[in-house]
Amino acid sequence: MATSIDYVAGAERPALLIQLLDELGAVIDLTGYTCSLKIGDPTTTVLTKTTGMAGSANGVTATFSAGELALTPATYLGEVIATSGGLDYRRQFSITITPALP
């Protein structure tokens, strides 16, 4: 896992850009890939996102809709999947959802 991402529960912005790196540290061009995002823990997925996902030369962008990140505040495991020709790139990262202030 490369990094940790922090969002406040219920936030929709900003979009999340996830860059996948090759063995030399260069960003992998994911133009034309089918991309998805899962958020959960090793036993349960609390969010599977397939819409609002776009692969590009800069990585994968996840654009969140209203309510998608209205998750129980916790630290989750995020997994981005980029698929082309039946083969996947998969990367995991930590995502923390913090409670919104009253």
Image: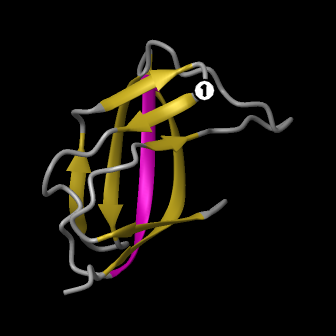
Task: Judge whether residue 6 is colored magenta.
Answer: no
Depth check: give the residue in front, 40 or 101: 101
- In x, y percent, where is residue 101? 26, 84
- The tally of labels here is 1
- In x, y percent, where is residue 38? 32, 53
Q: Residues within 10 Å of mark 1 (few under 14, many from 20)?
A: some
88 sits to left or right of 52: right
Determine whether 32 is above or below 4 in the image: above
Question: What's under tag 1, amino acid-wise?
Answer: Asn
- In x, y percent, where is residue 52? 26, 33
Image quarter hosting the N terminus: bottom right
Tell me the SS state at disc 1.
loop
- In x, y percent, where is residue 73? 29, 81
Which residue corresponds to the image point at 53% horizontal and 43% vertical from the top-left? 18
State which region is magenta.
74-83
Q: How are the colours assigned in the image?
A: secondary structure
Image quarter hosting the C terminus: bottom left
12 sits to left or right of 98: left
Which residue corresponds to the image point at 21% horizontal and 79% vertical from the top-left? 72
Determine whether 79 is above or below 72 in the image: above
Quarter where residue 32 is shown = top left
Depth check: give the residue in front, 51 or 88: 51
Which residue corresponds to the image point at 70% horizontal and 38% vertical from the top-left? 21
The secondary structure that most of the magenta stretch takes on is: strand
Quarter where residue 54 is shown = top left
Farthest residue toward the right?
Answer: 24
Which residue corresponds to the image point at 37% horizontal and 72% vertical from the top-left? 42
Task: Judge whether residue 80 is colored magenta.
Answer: yes
Farthest residue toward the left?
Answer: 67
Q: Which residue is mark 1?
A: 58
